[in-house]
Amino acid sequence: KAQIELLKAATLEGAQALHCWINFINHEPDLTNPTNQQLLPFVYYNLVIRQHFDGFKLQSTLKKHYLTCYANNHYALNSIVEPLKKIRQCGIPVMAIKGFAHLLLIYKDKGARVMSDIDLLVSEADFHQTATILEECGWKTFKCRPLKTYNPRSVHALSYFDSAGNCIDLHCHLL
């Protein structure tokens, strides 16, 4: 029930959203719960940035979560600029999907949504070339799942990591 109140605080408008935040805090003040932490930046975005509420309980805590999320997403998005330029220069159509697409198209705010990775989709025919471009840009896969043994017919994506710990999931299938 408390997490439903948190979701409502993140999505509803007006005093109802603020009321849901207060209900959440009164019933479950554990902000360390990973499920709760996923929504805290969006609650701040909804209450403060979208609706301009101020001076409510634990606002400064929400702000810290929002700013941390903003910084993490900012660095993650900047990390893919070079690879995306090279992918596009090769004429490979690439699509942002899942959280990355939501962040850019729906939220339009880098701090509103926690992203653990950046999901990109290319065709199966362009997958190997795109993966090679990522590797040329310094991105690496898990040693247990290298590109040379990757079979796009059995696995929908391959994860790549840069030296800062950012992650790109390169998909050739949505599901």
Image (spheres, grey):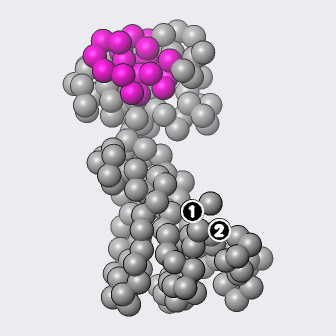
Determine whether the residue tagged by mark 2 lies in a helix, strand or loop: loop
In the picture, the quarter occupied by the N terminus is top right
Is residue 6 rendered magenta in the image?
Answer: yes
Outermost residue on the left side: it is 52
Q: Is residue 73 above or below residue 7?
A: below
- What is the tally of numbered marks visible in this picture? 2
For disc 2, the neighbor class at 10 Å (few under 14, some 14 to 19, many from 20) is some
Residue 17 falls left or right of residue 153: left
In the picture, the quarter occupied by the C terminus is bottom right
Q: Which residue has dot 1 on it?
A: 174
Is residue 120 rendered magenta in the image?
Answer: no
Marks 1 and 2 close (CB-CB < 8 Å):
yes
Q: Is residue 159 above or below residue 143?
A: above
Residue 165 visible in the snapshot: no
| Residue 171 image position (x, y, % from top left) | 56, 70
> Label 1, label 2: how many angstroms apart (C-alpha)?
7 Å
Q: Which residue has dot 2 on it?
A: 156
Q: What is the span of residues highlighted in magenta in the rendered image?
A: 5-22
Between residues 159 and 121, which one lies in front from this camera angle? Answer: 121
Magenta part mainly helix, strand or loop? Answer: helix
